[in-house]
Amino acid sequence: MYQRYHLRTSLAPEIAPFPNRTRVKVKRPGLAAHLVEELIRYRRNPEVALSRPCVYGVFSGPVGGFAPRNDSCVGCLRCTIEYPEMVQVYPNPEHKHLGDSYFTPEHVDTLCYEARTGRIPVKGAGYRGPFGGEGWNGMWTDMSEIVRPTRDGIHGREFISTAVDIGQKPPFLTFYEQGAATGESVRTFSLPIPVLFDVPPASVLSPTFIQILLAAAQEAETLLVLPVRILQRFRIQGPQIVPLVGHEDADALTELRFVPPMIELDGWNEALLREVRTRFAENTICLRHALVSTEELLKHYQAGIRVFHLVADYHGRGRDGRFVLDLIREAHRAFVEAGCRDAVTLLGSGGIIAAEHLPKAIICGLDAVALDTPLLVALQAEFLGECPDRERSRFRLPRRLTVNWGVQRVENLLASWRDQLLEVLGAMGLREVRRLRGEIGRAMFQSDLEREAFSGIEGYDH
Ligand code: SF4
């Protein structure tokens, strides 16, 4: 029976201390005088008097504003605007240490809100961030095609599909006279959301963490990429797992006790590809590849690879230092120019850390995204220093991590990101995410616009 795809959200508050963005400092003599005045004025309602001057309850603790509840502060600044002589609001220095230079404290804040509530973060006072900048900030999605206000996937009036197909998709089929197909056949499977889970870093591997990812992948009906050695070590199996195999792991494949939907090769190795093809003739084979030269990708396409998992570092940089946005566009364009883009599936990882990056990465040319650091942040992992490198970066998960809590946090995150993807699709009048792939006409790039507007003008330096 048809069932509409649904992610189950529910509140999952933080289990480890989470520093608030702001810290409130109060001049106590001033506050005492203010309270006395308020108590006299509102003597019939001490509750009102004691809640002043903050409606969010920062001053409503057992000893009132003498020990402000910083965790409740939303940073609206009303208190300091109304009573500048008594209250000051400062940035919390502990908050600045969240994440690293790429996964900024603001990104961590937003992502934790999404993982806690499963909802879309709404800034009531409007957007206060930059309107351009480096990386993904230099790309804007064009929402001017708001032609179908009823096409609203979140509120369920008209369905927008977020399903994607992964696998071998020949552009056309040819047949023998008897009716049998002569060449490549269609060999795909679908995921209800364009999101997979990528290999987690070694520093956080534990039975609980793996169980969380596995159960969350099952709930969300998506896939989890795990090295085949890890499958052996933790004795895990399941149809949600995509084994990642290096040339030294080929023998471990014989011990698999389940049929995986896809097998991922860790780098190009012809002998390994032959062996995997022999053992798993019916399975989809994916090549994990650093985001570098497009000639190599086309060479692997000629060798029969139809699914590519393009990987940048955690800061979204390819091996040559270029940003993932440009590298995805280049890979997509190379397949388009070779006339085979529709025959391949492009997955991508690295530097995709916010809900808006998902539709942007798809517009640049990916079919689906495999999440890495966002899953760690959803589970309140601490970054131990700068974490660009996939092998060497270190993270620490909270001690009180439990499977139920972790699964709910990941599911909330996916629900929030999916809703935001639906917002983008709805605003563009698209009714399936498949049509967003490579739709570069739906985006504007700051560098292009600036070049168009300013090139030839003295002082313009692109
Ligand atoms: S900034 Fe806003 S939320 Fe924070 S203490 Fe002041 S009034 Fe309350």
Image (spheres, grey):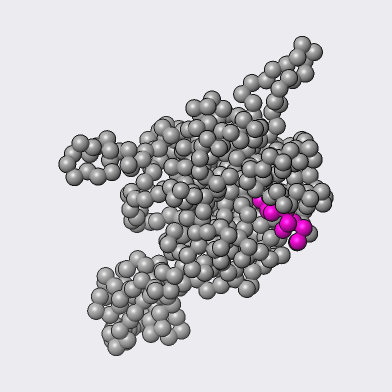
State the residue in front, 156 or 170.
170
Magenta stretch: includes residue 230: yes
- Inspect this view and state whether residue 127 appears: yes
Magenta stretch: includes residue 131: no
Determine the residue positioned at 65% across, 32% down.
Answer: 303
Determine the residue positioned at 73% across, 52% down.
Answer: 249
Asked if residue 90 lies left or right of residue 361, the reply is left
Vertical relation: 387 (above or below) 136: below
In percent of width and height, residue 439 lies at 46, 33
In percent of width and height, residue 459 lies at 19, 45
State the residue in front, 222 or 41.
222
Vertical relation: 35 (above or below) 354: below
Asked if residue 263 lies left or right of residue 35, the reply is right
Determine the residue positioned at 63% across, 43% down.
Answer: 268
How would you classify the magenta stretch by its main secondary structure?
Answer: helix
- Inspect this view and state whether residue 425 appears: no
> Farthest residue in the top direction?
177
**Callout count:** 0
Vertical relation: 178 (above or below) 347: above
Quadrant location of the N terminus in the rendered image: top right
State the residue in front, 210 or 65.
210
In percent of width and height, residue 426 lies at 48, 38
Q: Which residue range is magenta in the image?
A: 224-234
Quadrant location of the C terminus in the rendered image: top left
Vertical relation: 86 (above or below) 325: below
Q: Quadrant of residue 296?
A: top right
State the residue in front, 56 or 321.
321
In percent of width and height, residue 428 lies at 44, 35
Q: Quadrant of residue 177?
A: top right
